Image: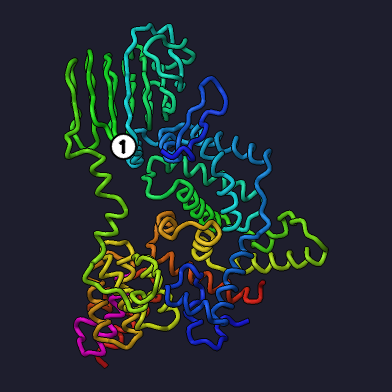
Amino acid sequence: MSASRTDCSLTSRVLGVRRDELSHALRSHAAGCVHCTRELDALDAVIARTRDDGSRPLAADRSERLRARVLESARRAPRASPSHWRPIAAAFGIAAVVAVSVSVGRGTREEPQAAIEPVARTTQSIAPPRASMHGTVRASAGAHFTRVSEEPDEIVRLLEGSITVSVTPLGAGERFRVIVGDAEVEVRGTAFDVSATGDHLSAVDVFHGRVEVRVEGREPILLEAGERWARADEESPVHEAIVTTPRTRERSHSDPTVSEPDTLATAPLAPAWTAASGFEVGWNALAAGDAASAATAFGEVVTRAPRDPLAEDASFWRGVALARAGRSSDARDALDAFVHGYPSSPRTNEAAVMLGWLLVDEGEIDRARAMFTRGTRDPSERVRASAERGLAALAPP
Amino acid sequence: MSTARVVRLHRTGNTGPVHLGDEALVAACGVGDPAALGALYDRHHEAVARFVSRLSGAGTDDVDDLVHDTFLAAYSAAPRFRGGSAVRTWLLGIASNVVRHSVRSHGRRASLANAFQRVAPVPVATPDEGASTSELRAAVARAIDALPHDLRAVFVLCDLEELPCAEVAQALRVPEGTVFRRRHEARRALRESLGAVR
C-alpha cells in the first residue's frame, strides 16, 4: 500500500509522525479524518511489530558466562589515570547533606584494617579489621559510598550520609582520600570533620594534625589544627542548583514579545511550546512540502530559544525552507545569518553553497564565488559537487 | 539520590553490600573497580543485549561478543563520563559504536532475516497463526535490515527503546535535529516497506 495515496491534503503531514508528536491543530484534525487516522494507526502498527521481535531475556547460565568473561577482560585491560575521576564525580549533583568524620588511628602495619562496610554509626568500638587496607570505614544507616581503589592510593567515594574512617599510618608513596563531588580531603596523619551539601564540599574542621583540602578550580589549602575552611554563602551549591533548574532555563529562553501561532493561540489545552516541539512542527511541515509553515516554525525556534541546541539546526532549515518557499531574499538573509552565526557547524559549507546559488541569481558573483569555494572543502561529495558546479558556472566562457 | 537506582555492588566476598547509583558505578569503573563493572553489567546487560541484537541482527555468539565489547569499552570510557545522559543511554551509545565498528571491520553483521531464523518461536495458538507471525517477523527484520546504520540506530533507540530524542542525541553525539530527521526518515522507510503489515 502506498503511504501517500490518500484523499486528504493533510495526510502527507502526518507521515512518519506519531500522534503524541503532532501539533495540537493537526492532532485535532486527525481525530476526525479517516485517512490521517489510518496513516497514524499504520505507523503505530509498524512500530508495534518491530518491538515484537521474539527476543527473550538471556538465559541465566549464558548471562553468568558472559559476565565472567567481561570481568576477566576488564581485569586485564589497562586503566586510565585515576586523576580523571574527580570531574566525573562532580557531575553527579546529588542533592543531599553529607557529613564525614575521618579519624586517623595509630594502629600498627601488622594489623591491617578492614574493608569498607556500611554499618550503624558509632563513636565507640571499631569492628575487627578484615582486609589489607589502611582504612576502616563505618557508615551511618543509609550512607551511600564505595571504595574505588586500593593501596597505595586508597580512595573512598562518599555520595550521601555519614562515615567514620580509621586509617593506619601511611608509608612512603601511600595515600588515603575521601572524595565528595567537587572536592577531596586527604589524610595527613590527623583527625577532622568534613561537611558537604548537594555533593559539594561546604566545610572542613581540623581537630588535630593537618589536612589538605583541594576544591575543584582552586588552589589547595593546608589547614592546621583548630582551623576551619567554609564555602562563602554566595557560592552555595544550593544557590547554584536553583538558578540552573530546567524551569528557569526554559523561562530564560522564552520571549514574551513573540506571539503564539494562531493555531496554538486559539486551541484549547494546547501543550506548552518547547524548542523540540517547535522544531518537530517545522520538520514535519517541511517533510510534507509545506515550506512556508516550516520556515515559520523554524524561525520561531531560532527566535524563542536562541541558546537551545536545536537553534543551530533550526537556523539552517529555516534557510532551506525559505528557499523552497520561493522567498529568495529571505532565504539569502537566513543562510547568510547561519553561515556567519555558526561558522563551525557541520552544515555551514552546505549552507554556503546554497547561499552561493542564491547570490548567483542576484548577480553577486564575487560573493557567490567565495561561498562556492568554501563548499569545495566540505566532506560531503554532494556538497562539493554542487560547489564545483557553481564555480564552473561562474567561470568565464 | 533516588533509592530506586540503588544496587548491591559486592555480591560476594568479605566486603559487605555497598549501594550505589548508576553514575557512582561508572565513577568507580573510572578508577578501575571491576566490582562496579559487574554491578553495571547486572543492571544493564539485558538492555544492551536486546539493543545490539536489534541493531546488528547478529546471532547469539555475535551478540555476546558485542555485549562483551560494549561493557569493556564502557569500562575504558568511564573516566570520561560526564553525566550528560543517563548511564543506560550512554551504554547504548557505546553499543551503537561497537556495532558500527564491528560491521565495518569484520563484516560480521548477519542479516536480520537470518537472525530471525535463530530466534526461538513464540508460542502461538495455531500453526497458521505461527506461520503468520514468522512471516511478519521476517518481513519486519528485512525492512529494518535495509535501513542504513544511522537511521536504524536512531529508530531502535527512539521507537523501540523509547528514549527521549535529547538523550539519543547525546548518546550518538549528533545534534538533536539530526535525531529528529533520522527518526522521521526511518519511520517513513519502514512505513513504506511494511505498509501492509497489521
User: Which residue is pictured at 24% across the width and 49% down the height?
Assistant: A243
Residue marked by disc 1: A198
Query: Is residue B128 a member of the stretch shown in magenta?
Result: no
Disc 1 residue type? Gly
**On the picture, is A41 further left or further right than A300?**
right
Q: Is residue A376 visible?
A: no
Residue B133 in sight in this render: yes
Q: Position of residue A32 (x, y in %)?
A: 53, 80
Q: Is residue A215 above or below residue A286?
A: above
Dot 1: element: loop
Few, some or many residues within 10 Å of mark 1 (<14, 14–19, 20+): many
For the C terminus of chain A, the quadrant is: bottom left
Name above or below for residue B102 compared with residue A109: below
**Residue B62's x, y, as percent?**
63, 50
Give the residues drawn in magenta, as a range: A347-368
Q: Find the residue positioned furthest to the right.
A: B127
Apparent side of residue A358 relative to residue A17 in the rendered image (left or right): left
Residue positioned 28% across, 76% down in the render? A352
